[in-house]
Image (cartoon, rainbow, N blue to C red):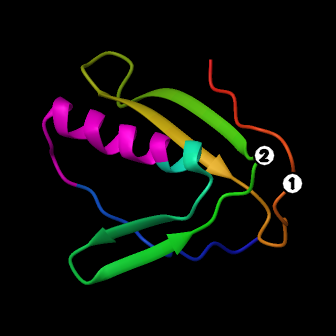
Amino acid sequence: MPEKVLFETERVQRREDVATYLRTVADKLDDGGPITLESGDQSVTMEPPANVEFEVKAEREGPTDAPGELSIEFELEWDEDTSGSDGSLNIK
């Protein structure tokens, strides 16, 4: 299935700033409203339904015998035609 990137940004930030950003996203999920992502002239608003697929991935990229790059990725995914349904998102 082809993928179209609607929004993308990447930059080095302090851990505290990343935590603030993630808390804002978590608050928006709790409130059940839309989430707007903005950076420069880019902007996209999405409305996650009550139930989403939540993926957490920890990765190491690079050679096996030398230092590489570590990452933690969080992804929320849902079908575009999903209507709002009863339920809640539980993250443990």
Q: Is disc 1 in contact with disc 2, using a CB cutoff of under 8 Å? A: yes
Amino acid at the residue labelled 1: Ser
Is residue 13 within the magenta segment? yes
Query: Eyeballing the image, is 92 above or below 87?
Result: above
Residue that badge 1 annotates = 85
* Lower sequence index among marks 1 and 2: 2
- Where is residue 71? Give x, y as percent: 38, 31
Q: Main secondary structure of the magenta part?
A: helix
Q: Nearer the viewer, residue 53 or 2?
A: 53
Q: Quadrant of residue 66?
A: top left
Q: CA distance from mark 1 to mark 2?
A: 7 Å
Mark 2: amino acid: Asn
The residue sitting at 63% across, 65% down in the picture is 47
Left or right side of 25 for 65 = left
Q: Which segment is the magenta one?
A: 11-27
Which residue shows up at 57% across the image and 42% down it?
30
Within the image, what quadrant is residue 39 found in? bottom left
Task: Measuring from the top left, give residue 37's x and y in whole percent.
Answer: 39, 66
**What residue would you read off at disc 2?**
51
